[in-house]
Image (tube, rainbow, N blue to C red):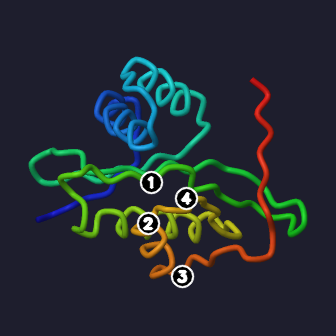
């Protein structure tokens, strides 16, 4: 099966939003395609994220990853947060996640980025295994905190 990875634009909004909605449901959120379309549309319209998506020769959207630009003050360099990675159920265990992650890495290399940061659920062992197989290193030195404000 031929799989291509492309950069998303508003032309792919409906298909990317469908994957994004599935991704949110994977993380126990209610299905809300309108919210998904609005969120993805805003990210693309405002150039706030880079979204890569995988598609096969039949035009099926197989997965996506979304990157957010940020900076490291300590190293004074650009960095990327790999915030979202999702592979549709029909495409799992076929190398789609690895292809998307390698595309993100190549993007980082091409844009002189220090590195890619990501997080995943403590019990998402499949994702952890994939990340570690590609050289991602688990942070054993810092705790990460979050303050909900709304």
Q: How would you rate the neighbour count of disc 4 (Cα within 10 Å): few for under 14, some for 14-19, many for 20 or more?
A: few
Q: How would you rate the neighbour count of disc 1 (Cα within 10 Å): few for under 14, some for 14-19, many for 20 or more?
A: many
Residue at label 1?
85
Residue at label 2?
127
Residue at label 4?
120
Q: Where is residue 67 in the image (x, y as percent from the top left)?
A: 56, 51
Look at the numbered discs 2 and 1 and tell me whether their residues touch, using CB distance below 8 Å. Answer: yes
Looking at this view, is 78 or 88 the one in front? 88
Label 4 SS:
loop
Image quadrant in which the N terminus is located: bottom left
In the image as oriented, which residue stretches furthest toward the front?
123
The residue positioned 82% from the left and 61% from the top of the image is: 72
Instruction: Locate residue 57 relative to residue 48 in the image: left or right.
Output: left
* 35 versus 62 height, above or below: above
Instruction: Locate residue 149 relative to residue 52 in the image: left or right.
Output: right
Q: How would you rate the neighbour count of disc 2 (Cα within 10 Å): few for under 14, some for 14-19, many for 20 or more?
A: some
Label 1 SS:
strand
Q: Position of residue 80 (x, y in %)?
A: 65, 57
Residue at label 3?
135
Q: Earlier in the sequence, mark 2 or mark 3?
A: 2
Q: Residue 5: name its quadrant.
A: bottom left
The residue positioned 24% from the left and 68% from the top of the image is: 93
Q: Earlier in the sequence, mark 4 or mark 3?
A: 4
The residue positioned 58% from the left and 71% from the top of the image is: 109
Image quadrant in which the C terminus is located: top right
Which numbered mark, 2 or 3, is in the foreground of this view? 2
Q: Position of residue 10 (x, y in %)?
A: 40, 29
Look at the numbered discs 4 and 2 and tell me whether their residues touch, using CB distance below 8 Å. Answer: yes
Label 2 SS:
helix
Which numbered mark, 1 or 4, is in the foreground of this view? 4
The residue positioned 36% from the left and 63% from the top of the image is: 97
């Amino acid at each position: 099966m031929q799989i291509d990875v492309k950069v998303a634009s508003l032309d792919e909004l409906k298909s990317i939003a469908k994957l994004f909605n599935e991704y949110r449901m994977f993380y126990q959120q209610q299905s809300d395609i309108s919210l998904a379309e609005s969120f993805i549309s805003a990210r693309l319209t405002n150039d706030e994220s880079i979204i890569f998506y995988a598609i096969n020769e039949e035009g099926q959207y197989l997965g996506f990853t979304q990157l957010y630009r940020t900076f490291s003050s300590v190293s004074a360099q650009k960095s990327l947060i790999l915030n979202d990675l999702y592979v549709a159920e029909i495409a799992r265990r076929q190398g789609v996640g690895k292809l998307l992650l390698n595309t993100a890495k190549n993007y980082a290399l091409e844009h002189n980025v220090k590195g890619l940061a990501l997080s995943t659920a403590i019990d998402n062992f499949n994702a952890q295994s994939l990340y570690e197989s590609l050289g991602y290193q688990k942070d054993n030195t810092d705790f990460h905190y979050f303050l909900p404000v709304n």
